[in-house]
Image (spheres, grey):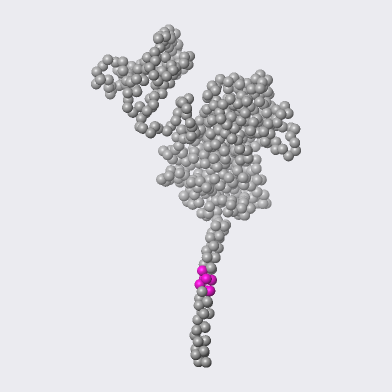
């Protein structure tokens, strides 16, 4: 009994105590993990203040859950916009400062819903899908910062892409309420559809103080050179229709017009061109006989024949892009995607990203008054140049037009290059496709930029018709050890260059057709100079004798005398 009692008082009591300790341990561990999960969830999803460091993103926060901000009627309105603004007068570059990556930092304001005093929103559409895509692309880029104190550029989450959906006064008041607005300094607004009836201004009508404007319809009257950024009008078809890249070359049609809402005078002129040139020109219009449920935006018609749009654009070498009520047209983006060379007739239009893109390589710009001569002008362009332009047009679309992300990143890169010009992209980086296979050198505009593996230089020799002299120059230059390539530019358009960079003879070549031997050449040149002097008001030219002959392969001098360190006036 005593033994049994002793056992029951010590032995069996140990087991319950061990279970209790383990239970407390596991409960404590579970509680810590649970609290950690709850804290993490609260940090990620809890609504933050207007200048918090939360990441921007609609996936974390619904537009309908954004704070509601009422705009009193008496709230201030920004100034209309300073047309004299330039980067050195209306932009504070000191905000950007120096950083090792030479990259601006962009802050996006958190979402807010602005309404007037009676609760009516400032926009009839709220946040569009396109603007959502744009802001999301910026927030995922290396430009983005969630620290407002480090920001160089501020982008409002107020969607002003389409002016048709905005209440002008209330939108301006909402901009002025932004905590870092400071008269629009270092703020960037994106707008693709400016103006409204009846005048359709070519820039956003919302008063915006000194804010930069990335606009899709600038004219030379409203564009502030070196301050604003001209952007394309995004085509919704870019996201819905995938056009495979087509090899450059001749197409079924020479010229195609696909716009439906063009001025009747332009339509009449295009119809006249169609009568004169027949099947070479396809003139499309909107369809009136489509079945119910068929999307009219995806179809075009000609005399009852229905074509798929924008697929039909790939069947033409040139595609007309005429101005409509607005200068900027989404048709331009569709045409580039199709690899069709755009023929742009929109006087005073500032082409998208023209600050960095060389549009001569991808388009033909014709004054509106020369529309009757369009066919003749386009026929004068060599076939090889057309093929290069087709290739360049498609690459422009891939690199800069294909998505809201591409448009947004290009805009920010242009602004970045202004602020850090010493680290800016070069002309070649903006305009040369990164991967091009070259079978031969076709155009000086498209020379490959990758240097040879071995060190060396490229010699460019310009010649007209002096075959023997050309060969002597080539022979001497080829002796230079560091020569990597020699390019001869043949300037005689009336005579083909000799075949083969081997030795060639030209017995039939004489000096009688030289330009300098023409008896009228000196007279014509003198008349030109005299005309220039009369217009200028004085003779600005001075007679100077100059010698610059670094080769001296024809001079019978000792070698030590063939070096002239003091070349200049004699």
| Up-down relation of residue 47 to residue 230 (above or below) | below
Q: Quadrant of residue 389?
A: top right
Of 212 and 511, the residue lying toward us: 511
Residue 84, percent from left and from top? 51, 36
Q: Quadrant of residue 534?
A: top left
Residue 145, percent from left and from top? 49, 49
Residue 196, percent from left and from top? 65, 37
Residue at 65% over, 30% down:
258
From this viewpoint, which residue is outermost toward the bottom? 1
Residue at 24% over, 18% down:
558
Verify whether residue 27 appears in magenta: yes
Residue at 66% over, 19% down:
276
Residue at 62% over, 28% down:
315
- Number of numbered callouts drawn: 0
Magenta segment range? 23-29
| Up-down relation of residue 446 to residue 150 (above or below) | above
Of 115 and 488, the residue lying toward us: 488
Of 480 and 328, the residue lying toward us: 480
Residue 182 in sight from this viewpoint: no
Quarter of the image with the C terminus is top left
Verify whether residue 529 appears in magenta: no
Residue 53 in sight from this viewpoint: yes
| Up-down relation of residue 252 to residue 141 (above or below) | above
Which secondary structure dominates the residues rendered in magenta? helix
| Apparent side of residue 395 relative to residue 320 in the rendered image (left or right) | left
| Up-down relation of residue 189 to residue 392 (above or below) | below
Q: Quadrant of residue 481?
A: top left
Residue 237, percent from left and from top? 63, 38
């Amino acid at each position: 009994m005593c033994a049994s009692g002793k056992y029951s008082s010590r032995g069996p009591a140990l087991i319950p105590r061990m279970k209790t300790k383990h239970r407390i341990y596991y409960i404590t561990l579970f509680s810590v993990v649970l609290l950690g999960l709850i804290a993490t969830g609260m940090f990620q999803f809890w609504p933050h203040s207007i200048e918090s460091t939360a990441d921007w993103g609609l996936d974390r926060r619904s537009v309908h859950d954004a704070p509601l901000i009422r705009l009193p009627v008496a709230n201030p309105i920004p100034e209309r916009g300073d047309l004299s603004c330039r980067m050195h007068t209306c932009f504070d570059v000191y905000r950007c400062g120096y950083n090792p990556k030479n990259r601006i930092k962009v802050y996006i304001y958190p979402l807010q819903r602005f309404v007037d005093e009676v609760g009516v929103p400032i926009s009839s559409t709220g946040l569009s899908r396109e603007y959502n895509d744009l802001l999301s692309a910026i927030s995922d880029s290396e430009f983005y910062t969630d620290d407002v104190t480090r920001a160089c550029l501020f982008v409002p989450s107020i969607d002003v892409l389409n002016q048709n959906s905005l209440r002008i006064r209330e939108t301006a008041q909402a901009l002025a309420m932004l905590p870092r607005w400071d008269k629009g300094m270092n703020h960037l607004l994106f707008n693709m559809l400016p103006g409204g009836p009846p005048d359709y201004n070519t820039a956003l009508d919302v008063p915006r103080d000194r804010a930069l404007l990335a606009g899709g319809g600038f004219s030379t009257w409203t564009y502030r050179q070196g301050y604003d950024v001209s952007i394309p009008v995004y085509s919704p078809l870019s996201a819905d229709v995938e056009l495979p890249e087509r090899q450059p070359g001749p197409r079924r049609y020479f010229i195609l017009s696909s716009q439906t809402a063009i001025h009747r005078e332009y339509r009449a002129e295009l119809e006249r061109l169609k009568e004169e040139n027949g099947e070479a020109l396809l003139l499309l219009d909107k369809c009136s006989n489509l079945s119910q449920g068929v999307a009219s935006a995806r179809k075009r018609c000609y005399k009852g024949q229905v074509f798929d749009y924008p697929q039909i654009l790939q069947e033409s070498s040139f595609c007309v892009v005429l101005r409509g009520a607005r200068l900027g047209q989404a048709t331009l983006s569709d045409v580039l995607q199709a690899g069709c060379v755009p023929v742009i007739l929109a006087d005073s239009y500032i082409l998208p990203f023209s600050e960095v893109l060389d549009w001569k390589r991808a388009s033909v710009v014709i004054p509106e008054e020369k529309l009757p001569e369009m066919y003749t002008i386009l026929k004068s362009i060599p076939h090889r140049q057309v093929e290069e332009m087709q290739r360049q047009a498609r690459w422009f679309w891939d690199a800069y037009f294909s998505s809201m992300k591409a448009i947004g990143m290009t805009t920010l890169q242009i602004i970045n290059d202004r602020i850090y010009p010493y680290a800016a992209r070069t002309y070649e980086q903006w305009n040369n496709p990164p991967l091009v296979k070259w079978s031969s050198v076709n155009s000086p505009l498209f020379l490959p930029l990758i240097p040879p593996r071995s060190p060396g230089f490229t010699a460019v020799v310009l010649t007209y018709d002096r075959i023997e002299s050309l060969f002597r120059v080539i022979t001497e230059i080829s002796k230079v050890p560091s020569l990597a390539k020699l390019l001869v530019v043949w300037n005689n358009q009336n005579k083909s260059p000799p075949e083969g960079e081997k030795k060639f003879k030209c017995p039939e070549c004489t000096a009688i057709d030289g330009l300098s031997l023409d008896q009228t050449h000196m007279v014509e040149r003198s008349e030109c100079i005299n005309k220039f002097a009369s217009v200028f008001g004085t003779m600005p030219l001075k007679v100077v004798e100059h010698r610059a002959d670094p080769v001296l392969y024809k001079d019978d001098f000792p070698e030590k005398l063939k070096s002239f360190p003091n070349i200049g006036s004699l």
